[in-house]
Image (cartoon, rainbow, N blue to C red):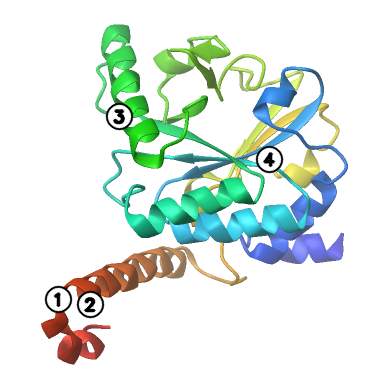
Amino acid sequence: MSELLQLKGTFSYDEYKLILEALKRKKTTFDDALKGEFIILRHDVEFNIDRAQKMGAIDKEYGIKSTFFFQVISSAYNPFSVKNKAKILSLIEMGHSVGLHFYISHVPTNNFEKLEYEFTQQKKMFESGLELPCKIFSFHRPPPWVLEIRKDYLFGALNAYGPSFFEYTPTPKTIKYISDSNHKWRYGHPLDNLEFSKMQILAHPDEWSKEKNLTELEFLKSLVDESRRDYISTVDEELKSFAPYRDKIL
């Protein structure tokens, strides 16, 4: 307990491992969750595919099969680059599942026709670019009108916010939903809610690192610095004349 109190809210891999240790006794995937009690571990990847790969390795170490969701129209990363595609496919080799993180911020409120059109287009990109079937998806930053669509299957794919996995209420009775969005535990800490027979935990890989005492500024800076190094590496590979200046930019 004292170790948890010291680590709670640090968003360090040590805190994450404590959570996984507690989840080892009861875990499942979205597909299996339709059959009964569950603890689902979900990862929406917003900024950093390297951190997703790292988190996938930790999940595998603890014998947990989790589900990773990737955007296909993100401004932060390209899932279809040779390097990133290989990293995403490595998650499947670890035993995890991969789905679409469905970006909908540009869809007008209550425009269900546009919503379905966008899903069809992003699904095509996902399947063509990653050469994987798109069997499951999670909404990116879903507004209320989207969450009010209470269907497990939507547009021919499994919906992570479907009624079998998510109760659309601030006071859930059966299914506990927990999220680490914006570097804060939303709706409680996983280890404080193990009495629920059904739980969906959203842990964004971007939010976690090996560091234990990062301030909010330091956390954001670490994300930006990692993306910056990756971008510089890409430029270095493409422009041979860049090498003399690389160290001055880093």
Q: Nearer the viewer, mark 1 or mark 3?
A: 1
The label number, if any, that marks residue 236 in the structure image: 2
Label annotation for residue 239: 1
Q: Are marks 1 and 3 in contact (CB under 8 Å)?
A: no
| Circle on res. 105 | 3
Give the amino acid type for the residue marked by disc 1 in the picture.
Leu
Q: Amino acid at mark 3?
A: Ser
Secondary structure state at the residue bearing disc 2: helix
**Relative depth, front residue between 241 and 168:** 241
The residue pinned by badge 4 equals 188
Badge 3: how crowded within 10 Å, few (<14), some, or many (20+)?
Answer: few
In three-dimensional space, the C-alpha distance between marks 2 and 3, rounded to whole angstroms, equals 34 Å
Can residue 207 be seen from the camera position used here? no
Q: From mark 2 to mark 1, how far is it between C-alphas?
A: 5 Å
Check the picture and name the quadrant holding the N terminus.
Answer: bottom right
Indicate the secondary structure of the residue bearing disc 1.
loop
